[in-house]
């Protein structure tokens, strides 16, 4: 978990948060206080020039867009653009675009922002492309934020959570660092996803992860705050009772944005049912409704496997921030 410093000029804090959340620059509401060159320097030092951004690079194209929009705003305001902005813009102009960048996920209650001087944040390395290296797991999908928000608002004290198809690890890192969950097991099947997941979990861990040798599917273990974290290879195509035995008691299954490909429904639901039959209480699945027929066929598939579905209320973004459209559903699946 990392700490983001806010500004003593309170008007700047929504802008600092917008920058770290990579809000679309068209939607950013700039503040007239920025006419002062001292306030401009403060914004630059807390965003593009901050120690965290220099160390964990945010997409350069986004940083440039942020500064360009700021300069346009100052131009419209008739205010001079200060040295700090020009220097940062020139530095970024010579930056080389890369395939992987860091993405920040600050966690705080939006209506308490005024009273805060710093924010906790998860930092992840992600690919810039939605699909790359033959997988969808190298970026964070919107539904994982809704799932993490749901967990932040639900009592999961001391629970053991098994996540299926963890991808970059965003949901689990928020849950492990900001709830009193006892054990969080990240899983995926794709080797590049597992490598990135390991890098991301390690980045946000208090201590380096331990590589675990004897068990073949347990790759790493460690801790975040008071939560034990594990990274395991778990492929829904080959999952079986031996996985339940190796993993041990699991209270809840989490999965986000795994309802997009009808070919995955069979192995995914088989894996969920396996754990439910071995003592897991429920699976909480968050997914974006990209088209209605996929959602209907997933529902029909669960029903055909004799599984019960309860539609839960999707929380509104508060601790985290995500696009609310297309709609994200959260369902609880039980035996
Ligand atoms: C769209 S991504 C979602 C990732 C993450 N849950 C999120 O919401 O950001 C789907 C994930 O499911 C994983 N996946 C796909 N098929 C799988 C399988 N057969 N077994 C395990 N994981 C699988 C992919 O590797 C990928 O990480």
Image: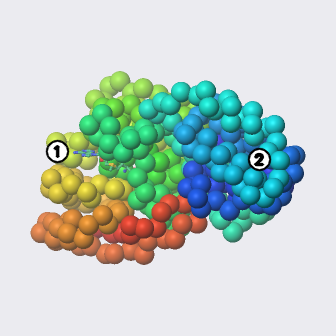
Residue plotted at (20% across, 69% down) = 293
Which residue is labeled 1 in the image? 237
Query: Looking at the picture, how far across and down is residue 43, in whole percent?
Result: 77, 47
Front residue of 112 and 67: 67
Q: Quadrant of the N terminus?
A: top right
Q: Is residue 15 found left or right of 65 in the rendered image?
A: right
Q: How far across and how far down the image is residue 118, in percent? A: 74, 51
Which quarter of the figure is the C terminus placed in?
Answer: bottom left
Q: Which residue in the protein does label 2 denote?
A: 43
State the residue in front, 43 or 142: 43
Residue 277 at x, y = what percent? Answer: 22, 59
Q: Is mark 1 within 8 Å of ligand 1?
A: yes
Q: Which mark is residue 190?
A: none
For the point 32% across and 50% down, which residue is it?
A: 164
Q: Is residue 60 above or below residue 81?
A: above
Residue 307 screen position, x and y as percent? 20, 69
**Label 2 crowding class (10 Å Cα cut-off): few <14, some 14-19, many 20+?**
many
């Amino acid at each position: 978990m990392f700490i983001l410093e806010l500004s003593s000029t309170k008007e700047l804090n929504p802008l600092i948060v917008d920058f770290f959340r990579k809000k679309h620059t068209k939607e950013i509401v700039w503040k007239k206080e920025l006419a002062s060159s001292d306030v401009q320097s403060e914004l630059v030092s807390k965003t593009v020039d901050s120690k965290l951004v220099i160390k964990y690079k945010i997409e350069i194209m986004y940083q440039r867009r942020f500064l360009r929009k700021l300069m346009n705003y100052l131009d419209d305001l008739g205010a001079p653009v200060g040295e700090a902005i020009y220097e940062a813009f020139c530095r970024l102009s010579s930056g080389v675009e890369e395939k992987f960048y860091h993405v920040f996920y600050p966690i705080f209650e939006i209506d308490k922002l005024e009273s805060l001087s710093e924010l906790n944040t998860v930092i992840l390395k992600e690919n810039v492309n939605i699909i790359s290296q033959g997988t969808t797991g190298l970026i964070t999908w919107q539904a994982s934020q809704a799932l993490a928000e749901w967990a932040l608002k639900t009592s999961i004290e001391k629970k053991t959570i098994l996540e299926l198809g963890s991808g970059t690890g965003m949901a689990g890192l928020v849950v492990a660092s900001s709830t009193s969950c006892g054990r969080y097991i990240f899983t995926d099947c794709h080797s590049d996803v597992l490598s990135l997941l390991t890098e991301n979990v390690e980045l946000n861990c208090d201590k380096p992860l331990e590589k675990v040798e004897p068990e073949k599917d347990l790759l790493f273990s460690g801790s975040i705050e008071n939560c034990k974290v594990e990274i395991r290879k778990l492929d829904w195509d080959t999952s079986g009772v031996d996985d339940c035995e190796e993993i041990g008691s699991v209270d809840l299954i989490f999965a986000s944005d795994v309802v997009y490909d009808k070919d995955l429904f069979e192995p995914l639901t088989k894996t969920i049912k396996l754990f439910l039959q071995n003592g897991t209480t429920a699976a909480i699945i968050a997914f974006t409704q990209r088209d209605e027929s996929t959602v209907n066929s997933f529902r029909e598939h669960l029903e055909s496997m004799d599984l019960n579905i309860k539609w839960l209320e999707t929380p509104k973004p508060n601790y985290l921030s995500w696009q609310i459209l297309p709609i994200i559903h959260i369902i609880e699946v039980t035996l």
